[in-house]
Image (cartoon, rainbow, N blue to C red):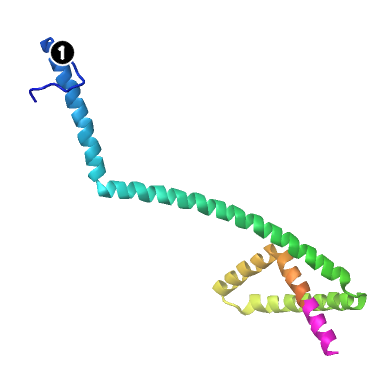
Amino acid sequence: MTQPPHDEPIASSVEELREQAERTRAELGETVQALAAKTDVKARAQEKAAEVKEQAAAKAGELKEQATLKAGELKATVADLAHQAQDRLPDPVRDKAAQAAGQARAKAAEVGQLWEEKAPEPVREKTARGAQLARDNRTVLVAAAGVAVLVWLACRRRKG
């Protein structure tokens, strides 16, 4: 290291020589740190994993938002179809369906009371959660029932 770098002028004093040496030491330290960072495979892998995790979380958020929007659209479509199906039902069928629904409600209340008296607590809790889920998705269930009635009527007309 007897020759100075080509882009720096030769130091004219001891003080300038010391400053050049200090700058060179600092640059060398930065270079060593950069090389050490490149050779630290574990740290680089952790950085990459964190980056991928962040990207995955962002993508999951986008997909969840899209799924929520699609579910809302589907729910509205099913509700519309259910209303259309209900409007097309003849009055006697609609009356019979209402009567059957009333009977089903009464029987369900009776069975529910019996269930409360006889079922173990953990089973009742799980059943209550399922019932709450059904109540939360009532529109979908009603639409599915309407579609089932239409299919049943169509099959019955073909046979008759």
List x then y, in percent, for residue 159: 82, 89
**Residue 156 within the segment the image draws in magenta:** yes
- Residue displayed at 88% across by 78% down: 93
Please identify the quadrant where the N terminus is shown: top left
Q: Is residue 67 left or right of residue 55?
A: right
Predominant secondary structure in magenta?
helix
- Residue displayed at 42% across by 51% down: 53
Residue placed most toward the observer, 47 or 149:
47
Q: Amino acid at mark 1?
A: Glu
- Residue displayed at 84% across by 70% down: 86
Residues in magenta, as a range:
149-160
Alpha-carbon neighbours of circle 1 within 10 Å: few (<14), some, or many (≥20)?
A: few
Give the vertical position of 107 relative to 50 (above or below). below
Please identify the quadrant where the C terminus is shown: bottom right
Residue placed most toward the observer, 25 or 8:
8
Residue reaching furthest to the front: 6
Mark 1 = which residue?
Answer: 16
